[in-house]
Amino acid sequence: MTWPARLATVILRWRLAALLAIHILCFTATYLLAFLIRFDGEFSVLQWEMALQTLPVVVGVKVLASLIMGSHRGWWRYATFPDLVNIAEAATLGSVAIAAFGFFTRTGQAIPRSVILIDWAGMVLLLGGLRAGTRLFREHYYPMIMTRHPKRVLVVGASEAGVALIHELRGQSRSAFKVVGILDPDRSLKGRVLAGVEVLGTLEDVRRHAVLHRAKAVLVPTPSTAAQRPATGERLQ
C-alpha cells in the first residue's frame, strides 16, 4: 500500500475526530482574524481580552450550530452547492446565537456586530474553500498520484449520462482513465466545455481526435446504469 493510501485509511478511521478538530481550528482562526480585520490589527488590550475571553463560548456555539445543521457530516470529496448552502446556514445560526449571547463577556460589553459579520463571512469562505479544494484535489490530482499512467479516453455524448460518467471516473480513487474529450453528434456543441472537458467534435472524427489527444479508447455511457456501471468501452486500434 502506498503512503497516500495509508494516509487516506488513517483519515477515514478517525474521520469524525479529524473533522471536529478542523472545524475548531477554523472557527478559532476566523474569530480572531475578524478582530484583527475590524480593528486594522491595532486593537486595545481590552479588546484583545474580550476576544480571548469570548473565544471558548464562540467556538462552542459554532460547533453546536454545525452539529445541529449537520454541516460536518458531508463527504468533503463530493462537496456540492447544497453543501455550501448548508455551511452558510450553519454559520448564520452560529452568528445569531453569538450575537444573542454576547453579553456573557466579562467586561459586560457585547461582541461588536462588525466582528460577528466578518466572522460569518470568514466561516463561509474558509469552510467552503476547504471543501471545494478537497474536491478539486480528489478529482484532479489524487488520481494522478494513485495512477501514474491513466489511460486517455474519449466519452461519447454531451448529455447528463456523459457528464455523470466523467464525474464517476474522477470520483474513483484509483481510476485508470483520464477523459481528454467529448464527442457528440450535434456539431453545434463543438468547443463547449462540460464538466471541465471540451466537446471536440462528432463521432465521424473519432480517429483524428484519438490521434491528436492520444486517446486509447472510447467510453459510451449507458443512462439506465449510470449510477452503477456507467459505460461500455470500445478500444481504438
Image (spheres, rainbow, N blue to C red):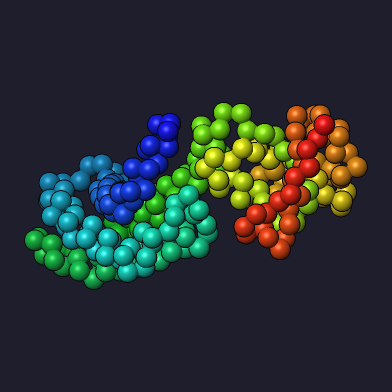
User: Can residue 227 be seen in the rendering of this structure?
Assistant: yes
Residue furthest left in the image = 106
**Percent of width and height locating residue 54:** 16, 57
Camera-side residue: 186 or 170? 170
**Res 30 seen here:** no
| Residue 73 in which image quadrant | bottom left
Residue at 58%, 41% (x, y): give it: 175
Q: Nearer the viewer, residue 35 or 32?
A: 32
Which residue is depicted at the point 75% across and 29% down?
A: 214
Q: Where residue 215 appears, x then y in whole percent?
A: 75, 33
Quadrant where the C terminus is found in the figure: top right
The one of 109 and 157 positioned closer to us in this rendering: 157
Q: Residue at x 50, y 63 (%)?
A: 82
Which of the image's four quarters has the N terminus? top left
Numbered marks: total: 0
Looking at the image, the residue that sits furthest to the right is 204
Question: Could you tell me residue 195's position as x and y percent?
Answer: 66, 48
Query: Is 13 left, or right, of 79 in this rendering?
Result: left
Picture residue at 67% right of the left edge, 34% below the top: 151
